Amino acid sequence: MFKFKRIAVKIGSNVLTRKDGTLDLTRMSALVDQIADLHKMGIEIVLVSSGAVASGKSELKVSKKLDAVSARQLYSAVGQAKLINRYYELFREHGLVCGQVLTTKENFGSRTHYLNQKHCMEVMLENKVIPIVNENDTISVTELMFTDNDELSGLIAAMMDMDALIILSNIDGIFNGDPSSPGTSVIAEINDTQEDLSEFIQPGKSSFGRGGMLTKCSIARKVAEEGIAVVIANGKRENVLCELLKNDSKTVCTRFIPSPKPVSSVKKWIAHSEGFAKGEVHINKGAETALLSPKATSVLLVGVTRIIGEFEKDDIVKLFNEEGKQLGVGCTAYNNKEAVKLMGVKDVKPLIHYDYLYLD
Ligand code: GLU
């Protein structure tokens, strides 16, 4: 009945909090009931839950006005403890154990940290523990923060080789216009041939979370291109998770159709690592044509025209064509000094091997 064996479920702050900012325990409990049901049916689930800042805020009365960073640190420190405690008790009622994984964007930048985190969650899943992931807002500084937990959930889905990512928000999906005007409706399916979706999407943000529909949509697209099904649905809808997983086509939601081409785990990591790029590699027309052909091709130094930035072997670099258009990202096999020396040289080890290259 269930085609997915391993899924990530992202629950947004707006699903978990009431209008006044307090935790909506009824909703939380209903979602835990559904996750517990699915877990008992053998589906492996990683939960990415927001709500720390929102629930901390409703707990505290601060006397003097706080700057944005102090407020986030203070509220998340208190709110995360409250949130995980609630989850722990709710799962325990089902005889299940959950565990907390707090992370930062930096942990996704190096392959070693990345694999370490993956290992932690694999071990939890093996032992039937439900990982509950959130950003460690107490130590994430602005420049290095995730855009929002949608971005984090995309990284987790790619890292854990998920079959599906379900993003639960307080709206029914991606609308083909302003959701409040008559005649607009939820787009049921989005595939990778569909053109720019930004014209449909409202730039506005939801009130408690950090994210907006545009980030949701671009993350969803990227994850679907990596072969993972993505669904954006309303987390406040009764029994939404169970309905979605039974592939009930009647459930109002937006489904992003996954690309049928499998993408390796390393490539998935590289695809999400653009933000950590240390340098730029520019290639000539011939090299570009070879890369864009259906044959698996590496980036060879003979076709490289320019190298910018300082990087070490195994760092992430961005790849550009002659016109300055970004073609993708890759993990380099040389540091920048060696690469500059060998630029234009034939018959040496590729600068970026095909297995470590992700083209946009
Ligand atoms: N990490 C934040 C929290 O738990 C939420 C970030 C977001 O809004 O996506 O409060």
Image (cartoon, rainbow, N blue to C red):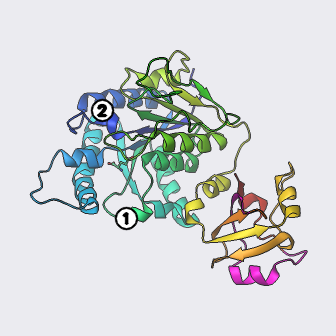
Q: Is ligand 1 less than 8 Å from the beta carbon at label 2? A: no
In the rendered image, residue 168, in percent from the top left (x then y), is placed at 43, 33
Looking at the rendered structure, the kind of residue marked 2 is Met
Q: Residue furthest left?
A: 63
In front: 71, or 165? 71
Answer with mark 1 or mark 2, whichever residue precedes in sequence.
Answer: 2
Looking at the rendered structure, the kind of residue marked 1 is Val
Q: Residue furthest top?
A: 250
**Range of residues picked out in magenta:** 324-348
Taking the image as shown, residue 82 lies to the left or right of residue 332, namely: left
Taking the image as shown, residue 117 lies to the left or right of residue 314, namely: left
Q: Which residue is located at x 58 percent, y 59 percent?
A: 273
Instruction: Please name the residue that numbered disc 2 is placed on.
Output: 28
In the rendered image, residue 41, in percent from the top left (x then y), is placed at 48, 27
Q: Which residue is located at x 46 percent, y 60 percent?
A: 105
Taking the image as shown, residue 264 lies to the left or right of residue 34, namely: right
Q: Which residue is located at x 76 percent, y 75 percent?
A: 306
Q: Is residue 345 magenta?
A: yes
Q: Secondary structure at mark 2?
A: helix
In the rendered image, residue 25, in percent from the top left (x then y), is placed at 24, 32
Q: Is residue 96 magenta?
A: no
- Corner quadrant of residue 171: top left
Instruction: Please name the residue that numbered disc 1 is placed on.
Output: 141
Q: Which residue is located at x 26 percent, y 45 percent?
A: 54
Disc 1 packing (10 Å; few <14; some 14–19; many ≥20): some
In the rendered image, residue 130, in percent from the top left (x then y), is placed at 41, 42
In front: 318, or 260? 318
Q: How many marks?
A: 2
Q: Closer to the camera: disc 1 or disc 2?
A: 1
Q: Secondary structure at mark 1?
A: loop
